C-alpha cells in the first residue's frame, strides 16, 4: 500500500517535463546537483534572517522612523478593573450590549464607562505606527535587494537556453533560491509576533504555498524558470510594501506630496511593473 502510494506520488510525469526521468537527474554531475537535503539549509538561514531583522529594525528602521517624524498614537491610560480585564482576555474584545449590561452590574460602573474602558483597552493592543513602519521597511529592503540580486544573476545567462536543462544551477541561482526560501521561512516563523493583518489567513496560505513551490521547483530542477518567476514577484513586492499606511503617510509628510502627485507616481510605478512583466514574458518564450 505505502509502496504504491510512493510510486504514485513520485511519478515522474507529475514532477518532470516530458522526456525527463528521475534517473536523468541522478546522472547530473557536480556539487550543485539539486537534492532535497539542500533545502535544510533554509532553516538556519531563516534563523539568521530573524536575527538580522531584529538588528535592522532596532538599529536602522526605528531611528529612521523618528527622523521621518513617525508618531505613535497616544493611548489613554485605563483604570485597572480585574473583572473587565478577565472578560477582555478570556471572552471577547468587543462585548455585546447584553454582556456590557451584565458587566455594569458586576463592576458598579455606568454603561458608558464600560464601553469607554473596552475602547481604550483595544487601542492599547493596536500595533503602533513605529512597529508597522519597521516591518514594512524590513520587507521593502529585502525585496529590493533580492530583486537586484536576482536581476544580476540573469545578466550572463544565455536567452537561447531551454527553460529546463539538465545542467547544474550556477552558484548565483543556488543562493538566490536558498535565500528566498530562508526568508519566507523566517516570515512564517514570525507571523505570530508580527502585526496581524486583515488577510492573516491568506498570508499563512501564501507563505506555505511559496515554500512548497520553491522546494518543488528546486528538487525538480526548474531553477532557471523559477528564478524568473521569483524575479517578477520581487519586482512588485518591494513596491507593494510602499502601500503600507505608515510609509505612504511619511511620503506625504516628508516630501510634501499632494494626492495628485502621489497618484501620478503610483501610475508610473504600475506602468513600469507591467512593462517589466511583458519584457520577461518575451524573455521566457525565447529562453
Image (spheres, rainbow, N blue to C red):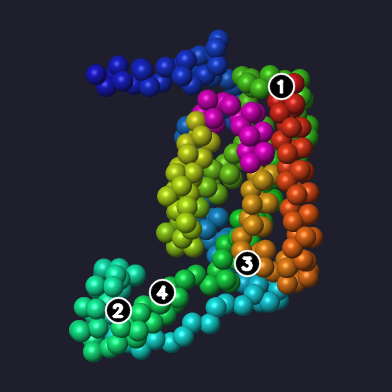
Circles 4 and 2 in contact, beta carbons < 8 Å: no
SS at circle 3: helix
Q: Which residues are magenta?
A: 217-233
Instruction: Report which residue position mark 1 lands on.
Output: 285
Mark 1 and mark 4: span between their CA atoms?
53 Å
Instruction: Report which residue position mark 4 lands on.
Output: 122
Residue 168 % position (x, y): 63, 26
Q: Earlier in the sequence, mark 4 or mark 2?
A: 2
Mark 4 and mark 2: span between their CA atoms?
11 Å
Q: Nearer the viewer, residue 211 or 128?
A: 128
Q: Earlier in the sequence, mark 4 or mark 3?
A: 4
Residue 89 shows in this picture: no
Mark in the foreground, 3 or 1: 3
Instruction: Report which residue position mark 2 lands on.
Output: 85
Q: Nearer the viewer, residue 125 or 113?
A: 113
Q: Earlier in the sequence, mark 1 or mark 4?
A: 4
SS at circle 4: helix
Residue 275 % position (x, y): 77, 37
Instruction: Report which residue position mark 3 lands on.
Output: 246
Amino acid at each position: 500500500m505505502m509502496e504504491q502510494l510512493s510510486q504514485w506520488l513520485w511519478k515522474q510525469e507529475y514532477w518532470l517535463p516530458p522526456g525527463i526521468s528521475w534517473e536523468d537527474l541522478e546522472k547530473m554531475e557536480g556539487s550543485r546537483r539539486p537534492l532535497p537535503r539542500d533545502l535544510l539549509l533554509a532553516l538556519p538561514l531563516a534563523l539568521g534572517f530573524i536575527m538580522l531583522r531584529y538588528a535592522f529594525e532596532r538599529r536602522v528602521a526605528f531611528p529612521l522612523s523618528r527622523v521621518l517624524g513617525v508618531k505613535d498614537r497616544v493611548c489613554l491610560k485605563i483604570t485597572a478593573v480585574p473583572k473587565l480585564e478577565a472578560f477582555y482576555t478570556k471572552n471577547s474584545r468587543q462585548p455585546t450590549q447584553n454582556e456590557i449590561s451584565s458587566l455594569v452590574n458586576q463592576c458598579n460602573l455606568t454603561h458608558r464607562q464600560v464601553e469607554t474602558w473596552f475602547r481604550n483597552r483595544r487601542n492599547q493592543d493596536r500595533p503602533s505606527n513605529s512597529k508597522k513602519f519597521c516591518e514594512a521597511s524590513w520587507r521593502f529592503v529585502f525585496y529590493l535587494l533580492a530583486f537586484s540580486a536576482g536581476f544580476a544573476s540573469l545578466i550572463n545567462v544565455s536567452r537561447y537556453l531551454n527553460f529546463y536543462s539538465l545542467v547544474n544551477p550556477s552558484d548565483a541561482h543556488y543562493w538566490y533560491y536558498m535565500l528566498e526560501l530562508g526568508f519566507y521561512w523566517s516570515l512564517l516563523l514570525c507571523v505570530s509576533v508580527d502585526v496581524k493583518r486583515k488577510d492573516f489567513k491568506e498570508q499563512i496560505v501564501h507563505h506555505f504555498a511559496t515554500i512548497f513551490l520553491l522546494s518543488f521547483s528546486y528538487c525538480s530542477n526548474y531553477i532557471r524558470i523559477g528564478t524568473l518567476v521569483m524575479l517578477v514577484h520581487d519586482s512588485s513586492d518591494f513596491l507593494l510594501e510602499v502601500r503600507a499606511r505608515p510609509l505612504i503617510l511619511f511620503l506625504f509628510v516628508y516630501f510634501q506630496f499632494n494626492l495628485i502627485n502621489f497618484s501620478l507616481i503610483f501610475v508610473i510605478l504600475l506602468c513600469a511593473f507591467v512593462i517589466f512583466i511583458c519584457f520577461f514574458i518575451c524573455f521566457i518564450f525565447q529562453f
